[in-house]
Image: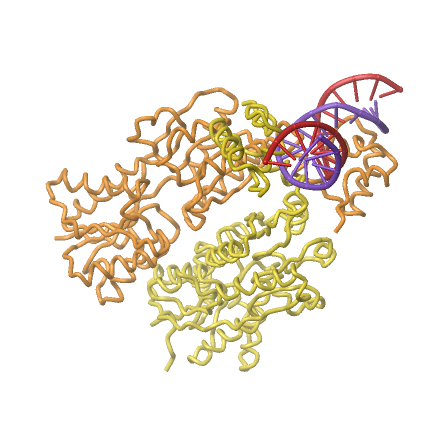
Chain colours: A yellow, B orange, C red, D purple
DNA sequence: TTGTAGGCGTTATCAG
DNA sequence: CTGATAACGCCTACAA
């Protein structure tokens, strides 16, 4: 599998490498006939330029990267689609990069920036808990998307686009309260989580407090670290435990739609009816929530809008039009069939 | 954003570049103290080696790539997890690459192979309809995963791991028939699809034929090309159309779980009960199907096993232990609550 | 319009 | 153990 290089092509064509290069890169100053001949040879020998070499040489690749933490989050899918479209519109190329849960996204960003000569970076999910030290090292403009730095002391130092998780979580909890629920269980993330999960927990507590409902610690259920976070199974297990312990509650608020679905299924399996016997609410506003039976009452994050604004922010930064900026979007409470109003 | 290079590090440390290189790459022949000093300087100046340059120089990166077509397919998630684990076990590094629906995965593969000096490639989804010409160009071992070449004349020329889509689709259809259903609608993919969708359609027809049930063309519903393929919305729309046209059927077989869920929701919205009024079946055996209400009768593809075998096949090829090989797995019919036996 | 040559940041091969 | 130095494949002045 000896690689065929630009030199080989040049030799075969009887031209110089630069001519071949010009042909490949659509340079204007090249004889159309020469170009065609070269392209022909390239096809025949199926020559493929080596990207590493290109990146190495090129000072600018007009590329922006999206680092996604949490591959399986269905909420991101709709955003990614928008990113792809918008970035293509701007004639930039897009590098999609997954980041494992245990990986440090700033490290990945640093490497990738060098490798691909990025013009900008979008962090989708994750981060939040990161030291500014790490963030400061990133030499190109970047935007944190669906990540809120609200509450951090350095919140004004970086661009981010998100909803106010505390507020939205509070909104949902208050909705449940307005429907007559007082004993509301919460399915939230790992105990140690300091990211979204913690914010949503805060919002929940805040709402209860505001309504003078003392929090029963047994209402608050944390994910099993053994399980996939935000999986339906996680929600199922937490709910099952809740029931087995005989915790008294009239509603369950899950901090993601997938957890909520797991919860509903656990209730059904236990012979309970939703919402007649117990109400369930989710968060995110995913397709699943709308299509589930019963449809899940949830908080819809304006994914498409947020994606578009993320791009706008990033390109403003790239073009130095603006400095950092924070955009907080309002969530929308989408009533479903899974919550019942208590008499 | 002047990039700091290995040379800079070397200069600061007062050593040669090769020494720095050795430090970075854990070469054995280097003075531990020198190494520590170098690593220190690297930390302080947060130097990050440029991957492009590395790839360019390195003849071998011990990397294998997974090209995923269909980012949103939840069925792939569980497989990817296995791939990550297994590849890490072998001390290889993994490159995850998404391929857009309109992109030619063989092109992407070719480029990526050059760029990253891959040892092997896994194609997840997609392909199937590709000319061997393209496949032959790929200079490293590769395996098609969840892609069946059964029925192609060149099926023995390449390695693949999959279920027999025709057979499994037939299995499900026969299951429905065995439950007393004769009027079975099919929610399948685009009319022009020649990939999985076509195979499952074939299986469906085959089963009906075997049972002497004449196919009513109105039973066969194709996706709206405007919509996301295999989305719940797709399933919803197809089912709605089915109902509005007053097509007579007692069961709906959707060729994916997500389509099935869309179907159930459409039925519920139309005031029908599932399975009392009409039965619904899916395909893939995803988490969603099990957690849906009612749980969806589906065909479970042994995702984890298939992923493991894919890896095994690939590494056997890499180590030249074996030549190409085809692995066909049995699907498992998972009965759910969505199918009712007719009296 | 075309060819030559230098360098992008690393690693590997040699001598020291 | 360490340090020059030559590739790796490509792009881009610069010269022709």
**B335 sits to left or right of B40:** left
**B305 sits to left or right of C11:** left
Q: Residue at x 23, y 50 (%)?
A: B186
Image: B286 above or below B331: below
Image: A330 above or below A57: below
Residue A89, x across and y down, in percent: 51, 56
Q: Residue at x 32, y 59 (%)?
A: B293
Image: B118 above or below A205: above
Residue B14, x across and y down, in percent: 88, 36
Q: Residue at x 48, y 69 (%)?
A: A185
User: Residue A326 lies in what quarter of the image?
Assistant: bottom right
Image: B84 above or below A202: above
Residue A7, x across and y down, in percent: 61, 27
Say which of A215 and A201 sits in front: A201
* Quadrant into which the C terminus of chain A falls: bottom left
**Residue A174 visible (yes or no):** yes
Say which of A293 and C12 sits in front: C12
Tell me how many marks there are.
0
**B255 sits to left or right of A34:** left
* Quadrant into which the N terminus of chain A falls: top right
Q: Residue at x 38, y 79 (%)?
A: A342
Say which of B317 and A317 sits in front: A317
Say which of B96 and A177 sits in front: B96
**Residue B116 visible (yes or no):** no
Residue B298, x across and y down, in percent: 30, 47
């Amino acid at each position: 599998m000896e690689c065929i290089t630009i030199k080989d092509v040049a030799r075969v064509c009887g031209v110089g490498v630069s001519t071949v290069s010009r042909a490949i890169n659509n340079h204007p100053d090249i004889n159309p006939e020469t170009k065609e001949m070269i392209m022909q040879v390239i096809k025949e020998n199926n020559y493929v330029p080596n990207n590493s070499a290109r990146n190495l040489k090129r000072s600018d690749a007009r590329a922006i990267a999206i680092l996604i933490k949490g591959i399986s989050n269905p909420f991101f899918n709709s955003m990614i689609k928008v990113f792809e479209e918008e970035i293509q519109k701007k004639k930039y190329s897009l590098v999609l990069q997954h980041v494992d849960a245990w990986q440090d996204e700033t490290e990945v960003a640093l490497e990738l920036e060098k490798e691909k000569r990025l013009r900008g970076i979008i962090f989708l999910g994750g981060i939040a808990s990161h030291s500014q030290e790490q963030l400061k090292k990133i030499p190109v403009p970047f935007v944190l998307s669906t990540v809120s730095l609200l509450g951090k002391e350095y919140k004004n130092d970086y661009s981010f686009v998100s909803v106010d998780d505390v507020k939205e979580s509070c909104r949902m909890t208050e909705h449940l309260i307005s429907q007559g629920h007082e004993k509301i269980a919460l399915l939230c993330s790992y105990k140690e989580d300091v990211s979204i999960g913690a914010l949503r927990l805060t919002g929940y507590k805040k709402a209860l407090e505001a309504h003078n409902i003392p929090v029963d610690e047994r209402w608050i259920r944390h994910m099993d670290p053994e399980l996939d976070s935000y999986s339906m199974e996680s929600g199922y297990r937490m709910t099952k435990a809740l029931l087995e312990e005989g915790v008294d509650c009239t509603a369950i608020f899950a901090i993601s739609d997938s957890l909520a679905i797991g919860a509903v299924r656990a209730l059904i399996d236990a012979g309970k009816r939703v919402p007649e016997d117990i109400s369930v609410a989710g968060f995110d506003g995913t397709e699943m929530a709308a299509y589930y039976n019963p449809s899940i009452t949830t908080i819809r994050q304006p994914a498409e809008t947020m994606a578009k604004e993320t791009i706008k922010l990033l390109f403003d930064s790239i073009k130095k039009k603006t400095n950092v900026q924070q955009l907080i979007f309002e969530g929308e409470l989408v009533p479903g069939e899974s919550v019942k109003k208590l008499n």
